[in-house]
Amino acid sequence: MNLSESVVSSAQIVTLLRELHEIEDHLNTMRRRNASPLSKREALLREQLPEVILGHHDRMRIKGKRSIAEVRNGVCFGCYIALPVGDRARMTAEEDLHLCQNCGRYLYMAEVAIIAPVELSPIPKCAPVVPKRVKASVKPVVPKSPRRRVMVPGSRKKAL
C-alpha cells in the first residue's frame, strides 16, 4: 500500500490512529456516563485521515479490535505472531504503512530508547599469568597378572 499520493505521511497516520484510538476508548467510557467532551477532537482526527485507512479502522473497531499494533522484536503486539523477516526488513527500510498478515492491523515500529554511551574507566594492565610448571611424573607401575595356563588340544600339560 503506497501512500505517496496522499498529503499525510505514514508516520503522521500512525500518530493520528494512535490518538484516535485513545479518544475513542475514552469516549466509550464517557458515553456510559453520558458525557462526550472529546467528540470534536475525534471529528477533527477523522477528517485528517485518508478514507481508505479510516474505513479499515472503522471495520476493525466494529469487530471490537484495535486497527493499529506495535511491533517489538519482530513480533506484532496485536496478535503476538512473529513477522516474516522480509516484512521486518521492509518496515525498517521504507516509509510506508504495513498490515499484519495475520490480524490485519496497521503496524508501526516500537520507539526504541537510545541509551547514551557510558564512559568506562580503562582496565589496569596486570602482569601476565604464567602457568606453573608441572614436573614430569613417573608412570605408576602396574603389577602384571600371572599367566594362566590354558589347555590346548593335543598338549599333554595339565592346567593348574
Image (cartoon, rainbow, N blue to C red):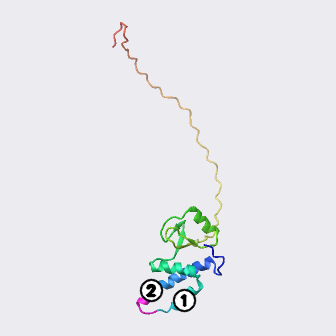
Label 1 vs 2, first from the N-terminus:
2
Along the viewing direction, whichever of 76 and 132 lies nearer the viewer: 76
Q: Is residue 117 left or right of residue 140?
A: right
Residue 117 in view: no
Along the viewing direction, whichever of 63 and 150 lies nearer the viewer: 63
Residue 90 in view: yes
Q: Does the magenta stretch include residue 32?
A: yes
Question: Residue 98 in the image: x percent, y percent?
Answer: 58, 71
The residue indicated by pointer 2 is 28
Question: Residue 86 in the image: x percent, y percent?
Answer: 59, 63
Label 1 neighbourhood size at 10 Å, few (<14), some (14-19), many (20+)?
few
Please tell me which residue is depicted at 53% across the width and 80% down the height of the picture.
55
In magenta, the rendered stretch is: 30-35
Q: Which amino acid does label 1 sit on?
A: Ala
Instruction: Name the quarter where the C terminus is drawn.
Output: top left
Q: Is residue 103 magenta?
A: no
Please tell me which residue is depicted at 55% across the width and 63% down the height of the picture.
84
Where is 46 relative to 67, above or below?
A: below
Question: Residue 134 in the image: x percent, y percent?
Answer: 56, 37
Quarter location, residue 29: bottom left
Q: Is residue 106 left or right of residue 2?
A: left
Q: Distance between the residues labelled 1 and 2?
A: 15 Å
Q: Which amino acid does label 2 sit on?
A: Asn
Along the viewing direction, whichever of 148 and 89 lies nearer the viewer: 89
Where is 129 relative to 149, above or below?
A: below
Under circle 2, the secondary element is helix
Check contact, mark 1 vs mark 2: CB within 8 A.
no
Label placed on residue 43: 1
